[in-house]
Amino acid sequence: MLKSVRQVIREQIDNKELIIRMAAFELKGSYQIHYLGSFWQFLNPAIQIGIYWFVFGLGIRGGAPIDGTPFFLWLLAGLVPWFFIAPSIIQGANSVHQKIGIVSKMNFPISLLPTIRIVSSTPQFIVMLIILFLVSFIYGITPSLYTLQIIYYTFAMYVFLIAFALIASTISTLVRDFQLLLQSMMRMLFYLTPILWSTDLIVKKLGDFGRLLENILRLNPLYYIVQGFRDSVLGKAWFFEDLIYMGYFWIVTFALLYFGSVLHLKFRKDFMDYL
Amino acid sequence: MNKKVGLKNVTKTFDLYAKNSDKILNLLSIKKDGNKQFMALRDINFKVYEGETIGIIGLNGSGKSTVSNILAGVLQPSGGEVYIDGVSSLIAISAGLNNNLTGLDNIELKCIMHGLSKEEVEKVKPDIIDFADIGDYIHQPVKDYSSGMRSRLGFAISVHTDPDILIIDEALSVGDSTFTQKCLLKMDEFKKQGKTIFFISHSASQMKSFCEKVIWMHYGQIKEFGNADGVLKNYTEFTKWFNALPEAGKKKYKAEMFGEQIREMQHHKKQRGGNFVSKMVKGTLVVVPVVIMGILLLTNGL
């Protein structure tokens, strides 16, 4: 039953060098025509973070801390993974439709396309992560053992994104409406993941019903990743403390990978017919 | 001589949908009847041996490009068998160059996509630059290239990735005569190495000088396959006869031929019961744990 999953994973592993080199070219191609070049990779999210800090850190919330953590730092710990996740999902889903015309003329495994797209955002993610650590240092939070968990959550994030982009890119090539749906979904999930507010608020206000609402929001696997990043940076919890949530996340990821591989292998030879 | 390429009873149909929603219903195998199909290829059979150079000629819409795409593996046939021994490489005008990258970067990118290692890329790079012969433009982004430069670069890259079977789809019609000459020399070299070349064009004169055998495609079928001189003579006679027809006669002829290629959709897919059931079981096996963990998560802390 794992034949398709194994085939897709083997394609990724056998071609890891190819993935990295193609991702480098992809980066080069997308920034070559800009005067500031790859500096935009850092500038773009930095401007956005600045706006969020101005509006939510200083303005509306008046900088009130969450759980003893300054709001801006709490926000940043969620925004950094989100700035990696959101474009990876949207562009990863579009990658096959965008590149199929080029790669179908050669002997090239199409399952690499979404992965290449995700890997090519990695330098930006690393820059953002460094900024996050600098800011948390300024706020007086020193790295601890908890911080090491970021390796685990980064790994979880990559696996989830690759699995999701595989199934999404297949569906999105067959049914173009899916791409638009995905864009709307991501805009919605930005508020529901939640990046801007803490779900503790609804639990405090609504009691048990609030707890149920929070659990419903937690069904979204992105919540797991974002929460994990916060826990690691702010030193709040260990990743093995909530085994149910951890199990849920990995089972969902596996299900996506399974259905993604089956669908992808079934349709990949016919992708050109759907353009 | 070894058989290099063989097509047996190959058909290619494109589904024509009256409504956009029919497409998705067909995809989900809900609705299969009532739609029409266009048969781009009908029962194509031919065999090609090592070292042969085959021309494919025909009017617009006769299925030349569909055949070349099937040979290159870009499209899958709807029916029949395709046998290809080796790696085939399709050269079409500006096939798959990244417009934002420079010519040099494109050389590197295309070569690694063809599976060449870093050292191999460095080895063939000077040859490609020399063959494309576009001067300092090699350091400029491809978006600034003229169409001639693009096809020169594309051609140069493709011939240097060492394909066993080369498919050239109208790519030479853009280059000037000096470049065409260069390409023809290169292809002669390939011929001597025992490589198979397919040459798609509607220029009978170029084909006469270069190909030994010619396939004449006619509205999705092979009308003639044989020695270049004979087939090309018949083809030229046909185009003369066709051009001499009055306007109304031409239209009528085309409509008749086109009508033959349309038919009601018939899917011969057999629904294999066992396979379907096992797929359903596997799918359920994957979904059930997700549901269980989801419920556990929902009731957590309540």
Image (spheres, coloured by chain):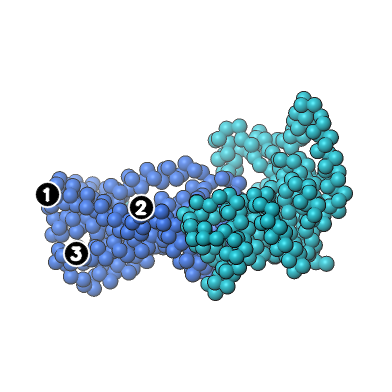
Q: CA distance from mark 3 to mark 2?
A: 23 Å
Circle on res. A86: 2
Position of B170 with respect to A104 (left or right) is: right
Q: Colour of chain A?
A: blue
Task: Please state the chain letter of the residue tagged with numbered disc 2 in the rendered image.
Answer: A
| Residue A15 in sight in this render | yes
Circle on res. B98: none
| Residue B300 in sight in this render | no
Q: Colour of chain B?
A: cyan
Circle on res. A62: 1
Secondary-structure class at tag 2? helix
Residue drawn at x 37%, y 63% as measured from the top left? A122
Q: Amino acid at mark 2?
A: Ala
Task: Please state the chain letter of the residue tagged with numbered disc 3 in the rendered image.
Answer: A
Say whether mark 2 and mark 1 are on the same chain. Answer: yes
Q: CA distance from mark 1 to mark 2?
A: 27 Å
Location of residue A24 (image quadrant): bottom left
Q: Are marks 3 and 2 in contact (CB under 8 Å)?
A: no
Q: Are marks 1 and 2 in contact (CB under 8 Å)?
A: no
**Residue closer to the observer: B104 or B222:** B104
Mark 3 neighbour class, 10 Å CA radius: few under 14, some 14 to 19, many 20 or more: many
Residue drawn at x 15%, y 59% as measured from the top left? A69
